[in-house]
Amino acid sequence: MSLVLALDAGTQSSRAIAMDPQGTEVAMGQVSHAPLTVAPDGAVTQSPQDVWEALERSIIQCVEALGDRSMEIEALALTTQRYTMIPCADDGTPLMDAIHWLDRRRGEVSDSWLLRMIGTVPKLRTIFATSRGRVLRTVAPDVYAQTRRFLPLSAWLTLQLTGSVADTPGSFPGMWPMDGKTGTWREGPGMFDLLCMPKPWLPDLVPAGGVLGTLSHDVAGRVGLDAGLPLVAVGGDKQAEILGSGGVVTDPGVGAISLGTAASVTTLVPSFSQDFSARIYTTAAAQPDAWCLEYMLNRGMWMITWLQREVHRGEAIAQLEAEAQAVPLGAEGLTVIPRWGAPVASPHERGAMLGFSDHHGTGHMYRAVMEGVCMDLRRGLGLLEARAKRRLDDLRVGGGGARSDWVVQMLASVLGRPLRRGRTQELSALGAAVNAAVHAGWYHDHAAAAAAMTGGGVIIEPQAEDAAAYRTLYREQFLPRLGAMGHLHRS
């Protein structure tokens, strides 16, 4: 029987998962990354070398677990966290740690008369100020002057695996000097100059499903695989997740909800459509000739990690969840606005815990955080459906948070909709495997591959009484408090 190897480099760990034609996990390796470096000025950085070493060790673990079956691997596919950028020398050597996607620093925009003019619109000023090129030039001008390659983590890892500097359009959410319709870099210097990213710094672009390169002899010898195996283009982890949930562009009723470090709601459309309000992102999908519409909550299950680390001082998640389950729905008036990371569309917003009373404890805080994340995803689902001009009746959930029955049940009740939780929560890896399977010729297209590899799982229905209560809380408590907090910080 044949196998493909899905590589998934996330924020907290890297994974290598061997999968068969039914999408079954045959073997897995996983290695955690070192903690991110976080500074008071909003800087968040990550060692690219640490991520590469973790990914390489995860491949070795997986290959060792496969034993003789490692010879059955026909293709590799890579998906990663997005918007984590690495300034490099001409040969790809990092000049500093990666500017992480969680980084909140902004670059100077006063050098351009055009940006000074459009910068009077706060949203546009934020979009250009958060360009990673402008951030790098502002916070590390010496490094900027030495930079000859500015690569997303996906392209840099492709370079380590294959020796090729290539990526796919789905690895580039947000503002880039890219033609969104064609998935190619723009002609002329205009947008490259505005974003402070010279074209020669950026990787070659390969369509989703294409080949980024082949596994080098050096890496193959270290990890125990055959040299020359193709590395198939996928795109970012969110694009991979909707494909891994079984969502394809020919099935317009499907929406994928990710309960990952960042939480999101996505759906697919057959043509490019940009939301200039920046509330919904449009990015190339992992499936060719398709685009993802995406609502992003920058701090999703990260909120739980933060709460555990900063408030509960390392108390076990299982214990915290048990305490939260003992708290009544609505956390007895405590509301969390999960804006620890403001969205691009509303850069003035900030996070808050509102409604404290003397009887509130750690269980209330945990429950309020989780309810806040779910409420925000409900809002995002509404925005996404309005943008897509259709109702998403087939919602699928995955990501680390979806391992909790309690969390998924709460989300179903908050949304008032049934959710399908698949056989695995490794949806981004499964989406990568689908792309590799199509390239290997197991299936004639992505729809057939997704149907064969992503089926199964369980349906979680909303609990009627809870759903009714959450409708009231959403309308009368969450939305008014979200709006009030936005007005409070708008100035």
Image (spheres, grey):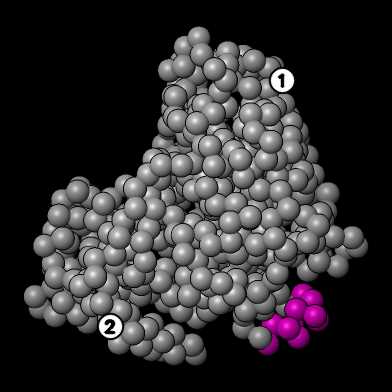
Q: Nearer the viewer, residue 146 or 403?
A: 403
Q: Earlier in the sequence, mark 1 or mark 2?
A: 1
Q: Nearer the viewer, residue 342 or 290?
A: 290
The correct choice, above or below, for 224 with respect to 345 in the image is above
Observer-side mark, 1 or 2, equals 2
Dominant secondary structure, magenta:
helix
Q: CA–CA distance between discs 1 and 2?
A: 58 Å
Magenta stretch bounds:
111-120
Label 1, residues with CA under 10 Å away: few <14, some 14-19, many ≥20: some
Q: Is residue 264 left or right of residue 364?
A: right
Quarter of the image that includes the N terminus:
top right
Q: Is residue 439 left or right of residue 306?
A: right
Question: Measured from the top left, where is residue 312 in percent x and y?
Answer: 20, 57
**Residue found at x 46% / y 64%:** 393
Q: Which mark is residue 472?
A: 2
Label 2, residues with CA under 10 Å away: few <14, some 14-19, many ≥20: few
Question: Measured from the top left, where is residue 264 in percent x and y?
Answer: 48, 61
Instruction: Using the rendered view, name the quadrant where residue 407 is placed.
Output: bottom left
Residue bearing mark 1: 228
**Dot 1: what SS?**
loop
* Amino acid at circle 2: Thr
> Contact, CB < 8 Å: mark 1 with mark 2?
no
**Dot 2: what SS?**
helix
Q: Is residue 168 left or right of residue 377?
A: right
Q: Please say whether residue 117 is one of the residues in the magenta stretch.
A: yes
